[in-house]
Amino acid sequence: MKLTVLGSGTSVPHAKRSSSAFWLETSGGSILLDCSPSSIHRMAEEGLDWANLDSIWISHFHLDHCGGLAPFLFSLKHAPQTHERTKPLTIFGGAGLRSLIESFNAAGNYRLLQQRFPVEIVEVTALEKFEILPGIEVVPLKTPHTDDSHAIHIRDGEKTLVFTSDTGPDEAISAFANGVDLLLMECSFVRNKPVKSHLELAEAMYLIRKAKPKLAMLTHFYPEWDSIDFQAEVRRFDPMCEVIEAVDGLKLNI
């Protein structure tokens, strides 16, 4: 698997961090993990084959994670790069995903699902395994963020990845991510977080220590992180594995 960080930030406009999105290349095809409004342009900036994207995972329905869906489907409908496309695009997410897309569609009668190729919508159930692409097994886990929010465990042969997206603290995440090759976890705040439904650094590091991944990457940074020495703060918690900072444009082989 190969991961490209498209957006390591939040909904807050930032000069160097766009909102949440990750491109994952697997043996079965390409997956977009979250589809923020900025992601549709970031895919092009990184030279990724957006016109042939195979599937999209929507972790939850906050706009900095799903607000690019309608613009992306609109672009696929009209871009010359997709005129010859015939293979399907499948969009996965929690209950309410179809209603969300239909609401976007109704706002302007865009006919977003009437493409030259099939567009399939799949609403998942927590802890029920499915194939997100041929040979790529996935299990979703309900997370304490919103009613529709899920983490996702992805297995591509012997390689594994867990993407928490936005979440509050929950030890179930550590069990879910036990021993994975990459734990991609939100860490919105440094300390003294103002809300329960996100993680601050101490909470993220606690979950990492319990999960014992081979590698961890923290993401979803609010601007308060700009003045922080990331590695110095991480070292204070003795994480027992390498922990890296997600940065827009970073590419990682898993």
Image (spheres, rainbow, N blue to C red):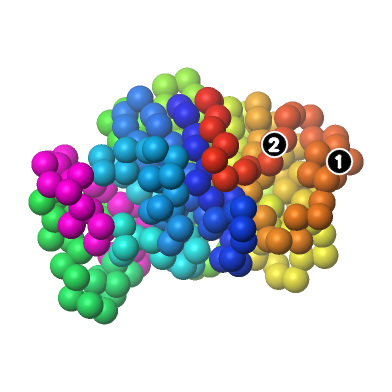
Residue designated by label 1: 232
- Residue 172 visible, this orientation: no
Tell me which corner region of the image, top left, top right, bottom left or bottom right, holds residue 129. top left
Q: Measuring 11% from the left and 41% from the top, which residue is drawn there?
A: 84
- Residue 61 visible, this orientation: yes
Q: Position of residue 103 (x, y in %)?
A: 28, 75
Q: Measuring 75% from the left and 71% from the top, which residue is drawn there?
A: 194
Q: Position of residue 141 (x, y in %)?
A: 50, 50
3D distance between C-alphas at marks 2 and 1: 12 Å
Q: Position of residue 204 (x, y in %)?
A: 72, 48
Residue closest to the far bottom: 107
Residue designated by label 2: 244
Horizontally, residue 99 falls left or right of residue 65, namely: left
**Dot 1: what SS?**
helix
Q: Which mark is residue 174?
A: none
Horizontally, residue 6 falls left or right of residue 193, namely: left
Work out whether residue 32 or residue 132 is closer to the camera in this orientation and state it. 32
Work out whether residue 153 or residue 250 is closer to the camera in this orientation and state it. 250
User: Magenta span has 81?
Assistant: yes
Picture mark count: 2
Residue closest to the far right: 236
Q: Measuring 70% from the left and 67% from the top, which residue is drawn there?
A: 196
User: What kind of residue is marked 2?
Assistant: Ile
Within 10 Å of disc 1 (Cα), the crowding (few <14, some 14-19, many 20+) is few
Image height check: is 23 above or below 66? above
Give the magenta part as a residue range.
73-98
